[in-house]
Every structure is written in structure tokens, then in C-alpha cells.
């Protein structure tokens, strides 16, 4: 039942919004994982981000794609909690939960062990429109336990403009998506975080339009 | 309805376009076989996209008027979206942009109910006044003029100007003069001449072009390209006029010259905008061409001017 709901969600909401209402150009779609266990990391500016990421995958794979999302935000009320877990299919992550002795990433570990494709936003929050926030350490801790799992970095450009923080109306803008080569875990936490940030910034360059040259028309 | 929109001259003209496309596709194969060392990918993509554009345009002409209005509204939607994606918009104006998009279905609805008076003033008067009103109610004054002006310019170009293609199509219904089939034939005349003019200017420029005509805006534009193109389009207009329009021979030649010269202006105006923003193409929607505004740039000028030319002289 949940599988069907999730496929319908992508087919009837995510894809029409992202492909028709907005319009998306994708670079290197072939670099996305086609089977789990795998991790997809993306920059985060909008609630539309997850719709855009979902519309990159074939429908048959959707039940295996699981985005990690903040429990304090999405499980606030019961209706939203039902929608987020059953229709969107999020894995709740308790932000700041590590201090209380609980493992905030337990759900993510389970998903990877079950061979699912985990979608993470390593900035942890949507932040300012079209600006990259600090990369949090969660991804480093998770990968320390699963160092062999491929990590596909995805840069999403333009979704923060279409519907940024505090906005509830998706305004049409063309969005560009660039997917990078798989990342490798590094022992040094800070250099790994810097590596992720650099990768995102490099991919961002690929989403920007070409500048006029001497042969422009 | 179906029969009315399919007059024999239009079928012949559409057939002619398909013959041109077949010739272009064959020519590119031959060129590729002769000079495999050159990169033909861009040209091949461009011709492939032309097949799609001509196919969709033909289906639009063959279908009913309401369907054509929906298709043209979609074209305006894509053009405005492309423009706003390039433009620097303010976060504060989020809702205003949403309202701006809503003007598209309305602008085409006026054509659907044949309300010419509203069609012609809706964007330049009502939307022109509404946009700043909605913006001032939000209250952000930083960058107000630039944001309001660029949004209005985008609406004029991509909604108001481009909607004149659909206005040409519905001109007999708008004025109650002539038969509906004439609208489809005149729309074909306008679009085919505008696009052939682009091609003719390019070919004349490539073959004989020396003196640059707008070096800062568009370094590839030459005097020979412009003159050769305009004269070719004038000649084509004169030749196709009796087949597709009610024009007298002089009026047909003049229409061709008008489309040729104003198509050039539309082209370089959009080029100037792209230079200002700092992009090569307006988008990536049409492989081999760039964005939709790259393809429709000439029509932003020729469509409204041709519309009024016909409206004044014949309808």
C-alpha cells in the first residue's frame, strides 16, 4: 500500500511539478545509483528539493529511495507525520539528538542495511535561497560505518527561487541539476566536509548558463 | 471547423516546409559524409529540433482554435519562465511573479471570446498598473523600479507581443471580417517568413558578410546578411502573398520587407538582453537552438507589427 502511495505521489505530484510547472535540465543522470545500498547527497534550499530528486529516479525504484528528514519539523502534527512517512517516505532524523544518548542516524543505518537508496541533505537545513550552508558532520559519521557505499553528489540550482524558506507557492523557474562522480569517505572529518562543499561548488558551476562568446548570435 | 482550417493553399505551404526540412536533413548527411572531420552535431541537433517545431506548429494549425490558443499560451508560459529564470528577481516579489504568470491564461482568454479591446490593453494598461500595486503592498522599496520594470518588460515581450501570433490566427473572428481559414493562412505566412528570414540573413551573412552592423550586440550580424535577408524575405512575401493572404502584390512585398527588417530588430534586441545578463543562450529547451526566446526573438517584433499591418489594411 505504501509503495503504491509513494509511486502515485511521484507520478502525480513530484513529476508534474518538477518537469512541467518548473522544467528541469539534468547533467549526468547516469551517475545516479540504480540500486541500493547507496547514498545520494544534495544541497538543500526548498521543500521542492525532494520532489526534484524523486523525479530523477525511475518509478519502479521509488519505493527503495528514502530521504532523511528532520523529525522535529515533519512529525510536528499527526497528519503531516502520516503524509511524510507514508506518502513521501521520509526517514525521521532527530536533530541534536546525539547529546541525549540516542543515535539520530539509526533509521538511516537500517535503510542502508536493507539495501535502500538513502537521500541526505548534509547541510541539515534549507538555509538562505541559493546559498550553500555549512556541511554538518552527520554524513561523516554515517559513512564511517559504511565506507564502501557509493555516494552520489547532486547539486540542485533554482529550486530555492521557485519556493524558498517560508514560501508555499511554487513559482515557475527553470531548474538545473548536476550530478557528480561518487565521493570517497576520508578519515579527517573536516577535510571530508570541505571536500563535499568543494564538490557542490564545482557542480554549481556546471549548472550556470554559458557566457556569450565571439560567435554568439 | 476542421475543414475550414485546412484550406488547400495552407496544405501546399506546409508541404513545402516539409520538403525544405527533408532537403536540409539530406544536405547535412551529405556534408557529414564529405567532411567527417568537422563537427556537425550542433547543426544536426538544430535540424532535428526543427522537425519537432514544424510538427507541433502544423498540428496547431490543423487543430481547432481553442487548442491553438492553449498551445500559444504554453509558448508564452515557457518564454516568460525562461526570461524570469535569467532575470534577477527579488525574493520579496515571489507572489507578484505568480500573478504575472496568471496574466497568460487571461490574455489568451480574451482572444478566445473575441474581445479585441481587452486583448490589446490588458497587459499594457491593467497588468502595467497591477504589478507595481501588488509590489508596493509588499513594501520592499530596495530595487523596486528595476524589479517592476524588468517584470513588465518580460510580460510585454513574452506574453503581449507573442500573443499576437494567436491574434493573427483569430483576426477574422476578432473583427468579423473574412473567414476563419484566412487567420490560419496569415499566421503561417507570418511565422514562415519570420523564420525563413532568420535563415536567409544567416546564409547571406555567411556567404557575403563583411561589414559588421552591430559589433557590440551581435558580432555575427553583417550588412550583407541584413540586406540579403530582407530582400529575400520581401521576394518570398511577394511570392507567397497571393497564395496565403488577401494582400495586393505591393502590400505582400511590403509585408515581406517589414517582416525581414523587423525580424532583424527583434533578433538583436533579445541579443542585447542576453549580453546584458551575460548568457550565450536564453535557455536549453531547444537542442541546437538554445532557449525558446532564442527561436522566437524575431517574432516578438514581427508578430505585433504584422498584426497591425493586416488589421489596418484588410481586417
Image: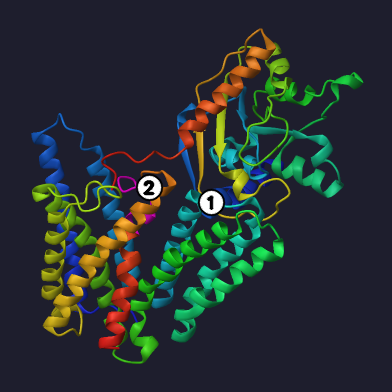
Q: Residue at image x 90%, y 18%? A: A101
Look at discs 2 and 1 and give the one toward the viewer: 2
Q: Is residue B231 left or right of residue B271?
A: left
Q: Is residue B290 magenta?
A: yes
x, y (%) of residue B303? 32, 71
Depicted A162 relative to depicted A199: above or below: below
Foreground residue among B290 and A114 = B290
**Which image quadrant for residue B17?**
bottom left
Instruction: Give the extent of the magenta segment.
Output: B284-296
Depicted A191 relative to depicted B49: above or below: above
Task: Provide the residue designation for mark 2.
Answer: B275
| Residue A34 shows in the view | no
Write down the chain letter for disc 2: B
Task: Provide the residue designation for mark 1.
Answer: A173
**What kind of element bears circle 1?**
loop
The quarter in which the C terminus of chain B is drawn is bottom left
Amino acid at each position: 500500500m505504501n509503495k503504491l502511495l509513494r509511486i502515485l505521489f511521484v507520478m502525480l505530484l513530484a513529476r508534474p511539478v518538477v518537469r512541467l510547472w518548473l522544467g528541469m535540465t539534468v547533467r549526468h543522470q547516469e551517475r545516479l545509483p540504480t540500486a541500493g545500498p547507496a547514498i545520494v547527497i544534495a544541497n538543500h534550499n526548498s521543500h521542492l528539493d525532494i520532489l526534484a530528486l524523486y523525479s530523477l529516479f525511475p518509478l519502479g525504484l521509488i519505493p527503495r529511495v528514502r530521504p532523511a528528514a528532520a523529525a522535529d519539523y515533519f512529525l510536528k502534527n499527526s497528519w503531516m507525520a502520516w503524509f511524510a512517512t507514508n506518502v513521501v517516505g521520509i526517514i525521521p532524523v532527530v536533530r541534536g539528538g546525539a547529546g541525549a544518548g540516542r543515535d539520530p542516524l539509526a533509521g538511516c543505518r537500517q535503510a542502508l542495511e536493507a539495501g535502500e537508496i538513502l537521500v541526505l541533505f548534509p547541510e541539515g537545513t534549507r538555509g538562505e535561497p541559493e546559498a550553500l550552508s555549512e556541511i554538518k558532520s552527520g554524513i561523516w559519521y554515517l559513512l564511517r560505518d559504511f565506507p564502501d557505499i557509493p555516494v552520489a553528489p547532486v547539486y540542485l540550482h533554482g529550486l530555492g527561487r521557485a519556493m524558498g524558506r517560508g514560501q508555499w507557492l511554487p513559482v515557475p523557474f527553470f531548474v538545473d541539476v548536476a550530478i557528480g562522480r561518487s565521493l570517497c569517505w576520508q578519515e579527517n572529518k573536516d577535510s571530508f566536509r570541505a571536500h563535499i562543499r568543494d564538490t557542490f561548488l564545482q557542480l554549481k558551476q556546471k549548472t550556470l548558463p554559458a557566457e556569450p562568446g565571439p560567435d554568439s548570435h | 471547423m476542421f475543414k475550414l482550417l485546412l484550406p488547400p493553399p495552407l496544405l501546399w505551404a506546409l508541404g513545402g516546409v516539409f520538403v525544405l526540412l527533408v532537403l536540409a536533413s539530406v544536405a547535412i548527411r551529405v556534408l557529414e559524409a564529405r567532411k567527417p572531420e568537422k563537427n556537425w552535431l550542433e547543426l544536426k541537433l538544430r535540424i532535428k529540433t526543427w522537425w519537432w517545431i514544424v510538427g507541433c506548429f502544423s498540428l496547431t494549425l490543423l487543430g481547432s482554435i481553442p487548442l491553438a490558443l492553449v498551445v500559444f499560451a504554453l509558448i508564452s508560459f515557457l518564454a516568460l519562465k525562461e526570461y524570469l529564470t535569467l532575470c534577477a528577481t527579488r525574493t520579496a516579489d515571489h507572489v507578484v511573479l505568480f500573478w504575472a504568470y496568471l496574466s497568460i491564461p487571461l490574455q489568451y482568454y480574451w482572444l478566445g471570446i473575441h474581445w479585441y479591446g481587452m486583448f490589446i490593453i490588458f497587459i499594457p494598461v491593467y497588468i502595467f498598473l497591477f504589478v507595481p500595486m501588488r509590489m508596493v503592498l509588499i513594501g520592499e522599496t530596495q530595487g523596486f523600479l528595476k524589479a517592476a520594470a524588468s517584470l513588465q518588460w518580460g510580460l510585454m515581450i513574452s506574453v503581449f507581443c507573442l500573443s499576437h501570433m494567436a491574434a493573427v490566427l483569430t483576426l477574422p473572428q476578432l473583427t468579423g471580417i473574412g473567414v476563419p481559414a484566412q487567420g490560419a493562412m496569415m499566421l503561417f505566412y507570418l511565422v514562415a517568413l519570420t523564420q525563413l528570414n532568420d535563415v536567409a540573413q544567416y546564409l547571406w551573412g555567411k556567404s557575403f558578410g563583411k561589414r559588421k552592423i552591430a559589433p557590440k550586440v551581435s558580432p555575427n550580424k553583417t550588412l550583407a546578411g541584413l540586406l540579403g535577408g530582407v530582400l529575400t524575405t520581401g521576394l518570398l512575401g511577394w511570392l507567397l502573398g497571393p497564395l496565403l493572404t488577401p494582400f495586393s502584390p505591393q502590400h505582400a512585398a511590403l509585408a515581406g520587407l517589414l517582416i525581414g527588417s523587423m525580424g532583424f530588430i527583434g533578433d538583436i534586441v533579445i541579443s542585447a538582453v542576453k549580453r546584458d545578463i551575460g548568457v550565450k543562450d536564453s535557455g536549453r529547451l531547444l537542442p541546437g537552438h538554445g532557449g525558446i526566446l532564442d527561436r522566437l526573438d524575431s517574432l516578438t517584433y514581427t508578430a505585433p507589427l504584422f498584426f497591425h499591418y493586416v488589421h489596418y489594411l484588410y481586417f
